[in-house]
Amino acid sequence: MPLDAARALAAPPRTARISWAVKDVLLYHLGIGAGHPATDPGELRYTLESRLHVLPSFATVAGGGPPGVIRALSMPGVDVDLARVLHAGQSLTVHRPLPAEGSATTSDRIVAVYDKGGAALLVLRTEAADTDGPLWTCDARIHVRGEGGWGGDRGPSTRGGAPTGPPDRTLGVAVREEQALLYRLTGDRNPLHADTAFAALAGFDRPILHGLCTYGMTLKAVVDTLLDGDVTRVRSCATRFAGVVHPGETLRVRMWRGDGEVTVAVSAVDRGEAPVLTDTTVTHS
Ligand SMILES: CCCCCCC[C@@H](O)CC(=O)SCCNC(=O)CCNC(=O)[C@H](O)C(C)(C)COP(=O)(O)OP(=O)(O)OC[C@H]1O[C@@H](n2cnc3c(N)ncnc32)[C@H](O)[C@@H]1OP(=O)(O)O
């Protein structure tokens, strides 16, 4: 059976040792569009080792990618076809600022399996710690088309939305044509993001962008626009991947300030403002 919810939930956590270097952080920042436009000197904090700050979303790729992507999809009780998988949501809590180089022990396990009828929704939790204590906790929500309908728990029912009032800040963010090809070098080599033939198997007419790439681009937009470029102020970032992003298109990032948090909505400008990220919140100091 490709998906056995009880077995997946009962499986013990998997642990791994990961490490990363300055070069990995620089590559990640390029992968999410840092340095664009190249004329902005502030971008050097993402692209020059002597001024390097680590965007907390680097946690989602530290050590060569989420201890998942393909590995997450082949654990006890989970053996699903990659062409049926979409990233549906992501949350990250950083327990302290990420160092530009380091090593950690990660532990990951499936913490929920929801039966959405036509699909299953898996929640994969990853916790990372080093010798000084916890570093980050991530939850990835993974949508598996065609795997629902076993009569299991449907889970929470949330419909994507955004605040109704005018945003405090709005930013246009260009996604480069080669963005997915660059981003995949950070670890997620899912052919969905590079190979037109594979994208067709998943029901798309061309490769789509990694959800975690849009996630990083959005967090960077918030940090640069509302947090004075200070990556250490970020505490958490949660989002729902409500619609696909195509390399080469322009995104509109709308931000609403709250008390210690920013609510964000991202849409595709040239597709009638189709929602891309909804239910997005960045908490900060
Ligand atoms: C660490 C491991 C990481 C693994 C990553 C995987 C590998 C990567 O390479 C893959 C990718 O990056 S894919 C690219 C990024 N993702 C996308 O582009 C997906 C865009 N979203 C969609 O297409 C649809 O929203 C879609 C298809 C996701 C859902 O659309 P619909 O079927 O129309 O569903 P909808 O009606 O919106 O919702 C159905 C039920 O599911 C719940 N739900 C959906 N997203 C959720 C989320 N993020 N969190 C919680 N619940 C969520 C809905 O609430 C709904 O529940 P119910 O029916 O009970 O109300």
Image: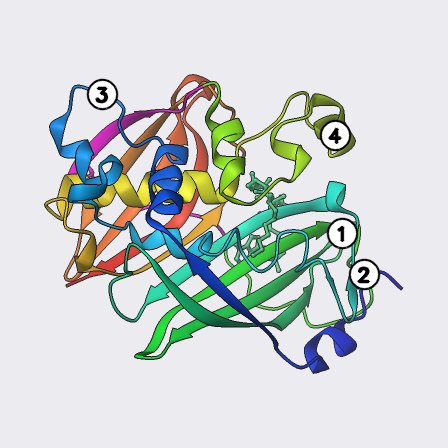
Quadrant housing residue 250 = top left
Quadrant containing the N terminus is: bottom right
Q: Tell me if label 2 and label 3 are in contact, CB under 8 Å.
A: no
Mark 4 residue type: Phe
Q: CA distance from mark 2 to mark 4?
A: 26 Å
Residue 235 on the magenta span: no
146 vs 84, nearest the viewer: 84
Of marks 4 and 1, which one's residue comes earlier in the chain? 1
Region rendered in magenta: 159-176
Is label 3 in a helix, a strand or a loop?
loop
Please state which amino acid type lies under the numbered disc 2.
Gly
Which kind of residue does numbered mark 3 sit on? Ala
Q: Is mark 3 within 8 Å of ligand 1?
A: no
First in residue order: circle 2 vs circle 4: 2
Identified at 50% across, 42% down, the residue is: 211
Disc 1 designates what residue?
A: 118
Residue 168 pos. (x, y %): 15, 40
Can you give x and y, in whole percent of width and height, for residue 204 in the image? 68, 27
- Per the model, the C-alpha gap separating discs 4 and 1 is 21 Å
Mark 1: C-beta under 8 Å from nearest atom of ligand 1: yes
Residue 149 image label: 2
Coordinates of residue 142 in the picture (x, y in percent): 61, 55
Residue holding disc 3: 38
The residue carrying pointer 4 sits among few (fewer than 14), some (14 to 19) or many (20 or more) residues within 10 Å by Cα, namely some
The residues bearing labels 4 and 3 have C-alpha atoms spaced at a distance of 33 Å
